[in-house]
Image (tube, grey):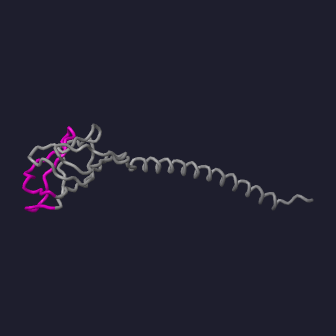
Amino acid sequence: MAFSLKKWIGSMLFSAFMNEYNENMEAIEDKFGEVEGDIAAAIDAVDWEDYADLTLLNGWTGTLRYRKNGMGLLWIYGEIIPGVTDRGTNITILPGGYRPPQVTALPAQSVNINTGGLTGIAITTAGNLNIYGDAADKISSGNVRINYVYKVA
């Protein structure tokens, strides 16, 4: 078999191409690994904990739940039946790590509102979910719905 310069150059070029191709593929695979790690971290950041139930106080009943995600957003959700509706009444207390950095007013809708408008409810930095307005004249015997997301401290 005779030496063929053309075949030799072709095989050298193919070998160089394959070496560069393999190096590029390794770099691409490394980058994919980094991106996969970034995606996993992003998913962890927005992944929500399981819901936990809050203990209702002062005659309030129903279900009020909360959960937090990795970005520090807290979701409080539920439908509760009024008990004591005097100004300052504490409806429940959120545990540490789930409280807002400042007093946070919540929009809370009462299904049977006598005079119209939203019920005045706020979460304090101590985690107390309190009535802060004249809710007694706005809440009848109907349920109060809460569905709110805020950033925890």
Asked if residue 151 is among those painted magenta in the image, a careful observer would answer no
Q: Quadrant of the N terminus?
A: bottom right
Closer to the camera in the image, 36 or 50: 50
Magenta-drawn segment: 112-141
Coordinates of residue 148 in the picture (x, y in percent): 25, 53
Coordinates of residue 79 in the picture (x, y in percent): 24, 55
Q: Quadrant of the C terminus?
A: top left
Residue for point 20% across, 39% down: 125
Q: Residue furthest right?
A: 1
Closer to the camera in the image, 122 or 151: 122
Q: As displayed, is residue 95 above or below residue 109?
A: above
Coordinates of residue 104 in the picture (x, y in percent): 19, 47
Q: Specify whether 20 is left or right of 85.
A: right
Residue for point 19% across, 41% down: 128
Closer to the camera in the image, 44 or 24: 44
Q: Main secondary structure of the magenta part?
A: loop
Residue for point 19% across, 48% down: 60
Coordinates of residue 95 in the picture (x, y in percent): 27, 38
Asked if residue 119 is among those painted magenta in the image, a careful observer would answer yes
Q: How many badges with numbers are in the image?
A: 0
When asked about the image quadrant of residue 6, the answer is bottom right
